[in-house]
Image (cartoon, rainbow, N blue to C red):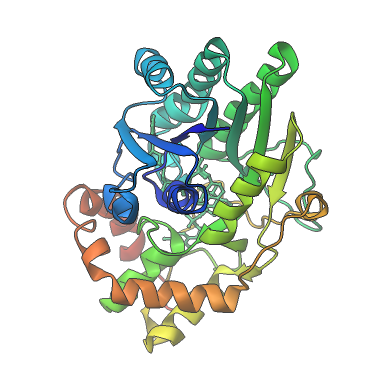
Amino acid sequence: MKNILVTGGAGFIGSAFVRHMVEAYPDYRIICYDKLTYAGNLDNLLSVSDEENYRFKRGDIADRQTVESVLQANNIDTIVNFAAESHVDRSILDPDAFVHTDVVGAYILLDEGRKHGIGRFCHVSTDEVYGDIDLGQSSEDDQFLPNSPYAASKAGGELMVRAYHVTYGMDTVVTRGSNTYGPYQYPEKLIPFFTTEAIDDKPLPLYGDGKQIRDWLYVDDHALGVDFLLHHGISGQAYNLAGENQRFNIDVTKRILELLGKPQSLIKHVPDREGHDRRYAMSAQKARQLGWTRKFDFETGIEATVRWYLENEWWWRKIKTGAYLDYYERQYAERLATAKLP
Ligand code: NAD
Ligand code: DAU
């Protein structure tokens, strides 16, 4: 392993992975390949932009010609695929881009990777492929029951990875992470959205009763988990990267407000997300048995995260303009107009 193509490396988790890999492995060349959609941001990579072992190339993973040329030009031997459309609410509004990137894009990367004779293909997936789970924890061999267009597109991409391993003998590993949070997360996802809205004393649109449960994983634990599985995962296997920090959305929201010293009256219960999964929970046993460990508990992670958004307004204020505001209007204007008091 020498020349690693990291797709989607300008996004939230991908950039944490790139920053980590560039520093931890001076002998590897890290080539970040990213389309720079609304969620891709080169500010996330400023700290490594001058490093010798780092390059950036703009491109779409579903664009076969550009993928082929980037693989050849850089003599790529390893691919780590973070590239995705990743926001459930956007997938409900416009599923098209999700099929393009998460299914077709994953396929093109696999196919070009195979033709180019690459070694390991590490594919970053999600706990959402298992769907809603009432009780207990999802294990890697559980059935896929994805419920949103996002979750279904991630399941489709993953199944293509499986097929390329079984049919063509490609050396693949799949990681399934749980809800991830931390610095540099685009402020449309629950924690950065509510933190930055609360800083400005704006209403926090909590879907439904707020009693949905998510399992929170700090971004550095996720990035290091992908590094660990890239190096140690058994070929053809999938591994859960679970935070094992389950929280009700309402409790996460209240903690953010407490940390910011803001009133709970900012919480507005708004009409629910369509098809909203009530609970995700995974067992991390398989990755743990291989040697993966997490460093951050939720309390440490959420404090560090809220502090980061307070100290880095330069990063998020310029995002929350233009097309971001159009999306906000589309997603929240009507919901907030019918909000119930807590
Ligand atoms: P993100 O939305 O912050 O970043 C996605 C990145 O992919 C962006 O930089 C974007 O420009 C790029 N991209 C999108 N379409 C592309 C295309 N066609 N070609 C090339 N680049 C493209 O996402 P994230 O939260 O960092 O998630 C990264 C990966 O981890 C995704 O595969 C996601 O499904 C998975 N995941 C995310 C979470 C989470 O809680 N955020 C949890 C588990 C798994
Ligand atoms: O579980 C892993 C997944 O976590 C990843 O695969 C996805 O890429 C990532 O976006 C995330 O999906 P969620 O839908 O769980 O994350 P989100 O931050 O959008 O929402 C978290 C919870 O908060 C969810 O139950 C919906 C709720 N929510 C979210 C928003 C944006 C609200 O109540 N109000 C909101 O405005």
Residue 235 appearing in the image: yes
**Left or right, residue 185 beside residue 110:** left
Where 274 falls versus 174 (above or below)? below
Q: Position of residue 315 (x, y in %)?
A: 26, 62
Please tell me which residue lies in front, 198 or 178: 178
* Residue shown at the point (68%, 25%) measured from the top left: 171
* Residue shown at the point (45%, 21%) measured from the top left: 75
Q: In which quarter of the image is ligand 1?
A: top left
Residue 239 falls in image quadrant = top right
Residue 267 appearing in the image: no
Q: Where is residue 123 in the image (x, y as percent from the top left)?
A: 59, 34
Residue pushed farthest front?
Answer: 27
Q: Where is residue 4 in the image (x, y as percent from the top left)?
A: 49, 33
**Left or right, residue 308 beside residue 46:** right
Where 209 falls versus 321 (above or below)? below
Where 302 falls versus 150 (above or below)? below
Please tell me which residue lies in front, 61 or 277: 61
* Residue shown at the point (39%, 65%) measured from the top left: 192
Residue 56 falls in image quadrant = top left
**Left or right, residue 265 beside residue 113:** left
Residue pushed farthest left?
Answer: 322
* Quarter occupied by the N terminus: top right
Please tell me which residue lies in front, 189 or 110: 110
Q: Position of residue 85 (x, y in %)?
A: 43, 38
Q: How many marks?
A: 0
